[in-house]
Image (spheres, helix red, strand yellow):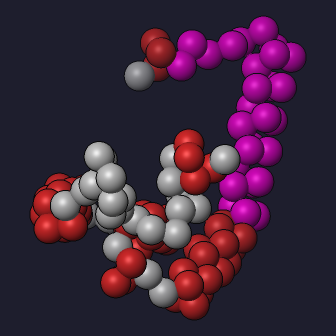
Amino acid sequence: MHVLKHGLLAEELLIGVGEFKEDPEAFGQLLASLREHYQPSGCWSRALWRRSRPDEFDPTQLLKDLKAESDRLLERLPEVKASQKRQADRWKAEAATGDVADDQSAA
C-alpha cells in the first residue's frame, strides 16, 4: 500500500514502463537543481537525498548518520530539560505573583 501512496518503499525509483514512463536524464537534472537550491545538510536531509539517488544510497552510511544524529540529540537532552525547567519555574513564579509578562510586548 505504501508503495502506491508515496513510493518511499518502492523498489524502483522511476517508472520505467507504460504510459507514465519517466526520463532518467530529466530526473537527474531535476535532482541536481534541487540539491543546488536546498543544499541538504544534516542527517535527515542527507538520508532523504540518498534515498532519491540510488547511486548515492548506502544503508550502512545511513545507519551511521542516524546513530550520530541520535547521539548528538541525546547529548543535548540535559540542556533542553534544564531550559524547560527554568521556563516552567518562571511561569510558576509569574502565576504566583500575578505578574504575567506579555512576551509580545517585551519584544
Which is nearer the eye, 25 or 18?
18
Residue displayed at 76% across by 26% down:
91
Residue farthest along the front direction in this orientation: 18
In the image, residue 101 lies at what x, y percent? 62, 16
In the image, residue 27 lies at what x, y percent? 21, 61
Residue 75 in sight: yes
Q: Is residue 30 left or right of residue 12?
A: left
In the figure, 104 relative to 82: above or below? above
Q: Is residue 44 left or right of residue 84?
A: left
Residue displayed at 81% across by 16% down:
95
Which is nearer the eye, 105 or 58?
58
Residue displayed at 32% across by 63% down:
16
Residue farthest along the top direction in this orientation: 98
Quadrant for residue 48, please give it.
bottom left
Quadrant for residue 103, please give it.
top right
The part of the chain drawn in magenta is 77-103
In the image, residue 13 lies at what x, y percent? 40, 65
Residue 32 in sight: no
Residue 98, magenta (yes or no): yes
Circle count = 0
